[in-house]
Image (tube, rainbow, N blue to C red):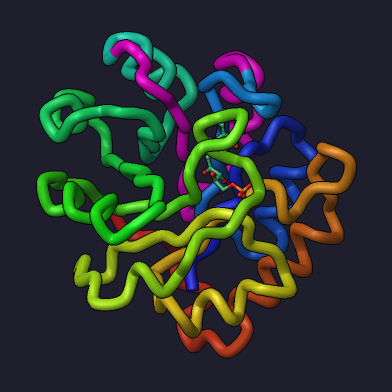
Amino acid sequence: MKVKICGITTQQAADQAIESGADFIGFVFAKSKRRIDKDRAKAIAESIPSNVKKVGVFVNEDVEVIKDIAETVGLDYVQLHGDESPEFCDRVGFPIIKAFQVRSKSDLEEISNYNCNYYLLDSPAGKYRGGNGETFDWKLTKDLNLDGKVILAGGLHAENVQDAIKEVQPEGIDVSSGVETDGAKDLNKIDAFIKEAKKGDTDGNLSATE
Ligand SMILES: O=C(O)c1ccccc1NCC(=O)[C@H](O)[C@H](O)COP(=O)(O)O
C-alpha cells in the first residue's frame, strides 16, 4: 500500500515520514492552514530521497505559477484539488494527481474524462478544498474501475485505515489531519499510520510508480 503524508511544513515531519516508509510527501501551495512557501518546500525537498515522491497541492492555480513552483521545488507530481478541467491537467506538463470530492455516485462520472496518473478520492470541501479530516461514504466507490490508480483520502487515521483499505482497495492512501495533534504533525501518529496502512503488505517497500 502506497502512503502519502500530506501537508508537511517541517523538516522533522518530513524526516519521520521518510523513516517510517512514506511513498509520497505532500506540500500544500493552496489556501490552507498548512500552506508552505516554495523556498521552504525546496529546502525540505532537497532532503527527500528520490524513491519518495514529492507532491505539490494546488487549487485553481494559474498554470505558470504551478510550473514555476514544480520546477523550483523539484516536484514529482502536481495534485490539483480545485475545478481544473481535463484540458488544464494536460497543459501542466507534470505527472498529475487529480482530486475529486465524493458526495454521490454522480461526482464520479466526470473521472473518465481525465487522463491522469492517480485519481485522489476525497471528502467534500469544508473550510478548505481539502485536509478537512472528514470521511465520505466509501461504498460509493464500488464498481469504480480506475486501473489501480485510486488514492483514497479524507478523514483517515490509524484506527480506520485498514477498514478503508478493505472497502475501497485503493492503490494508495493519503492522510493529513489524522496524523496531527492540535493542528501540527505528530511524529508518533505519522509512524503509527504508516505502519498500520502497510500492515500485511507484500510490496510495502516498493516506491511509487510514475
Ligand atoms: O491539506 C490541506 O490543508 C489542503 C487544503 C486545500 C486543498 C487540499 C488540501 N489537502 C489535500 C490532501 O491531499 C489532504 O491530505 C486530503 O484532503 C485529506 O485530508 P485529511 O482529511 O485531513 O486527511
Expressed as whole percent of the image width and height from the top left, the position of residue 34 reads: 67, 28
Count the numbered circles shown.
Answer: 0
Left or right position of 16 against 170: right
Q: Is residue 53 magenta?
A: yes
Left or right position of 167 against 181: left
Which residue is painted at 47% across and 55% down in the image?
Answer: 51
Left or right position of 74 against 93: right
Question: What residue span does the magenta drawing correspond to?
Answer: 37-62
Q: Is residue 210 above or below residue 167?
A: above
Q: Nearer the viewer, residue 81 or 199?
A: 81
Which residue is painted at 15% across and 45% down in the image?
Answer: 114
Residue 28, image quadrant: top right
Left or right position of 178 against 30: right
Q: Quadrant of ligand 1?
A: top right
Expressed as whole percent of the image width and height from the top left, the position of residue 178 reads: 72, 55
Expressed as whole percent of the image width and height from the top left, the position of residue 169 reads: 40, 78
Which residue is painted at 42% across and 33% down in the image?
Answer: 75
Q: Nearer the viewer, residue 139 or 52?
A: 139
Expressed as whole percent of the image width and height from the top left, the position of residue 171 reads: 38, 69
Q: Nearer the viewer, residue 154 or 18?
A: 154
Which residue is painted at 28% across and 40% down in the image?
Answer: 96
Q: Is residue 44 magenta?
A: yes
Q: Is residue 18 above or below residue 56?
A: below
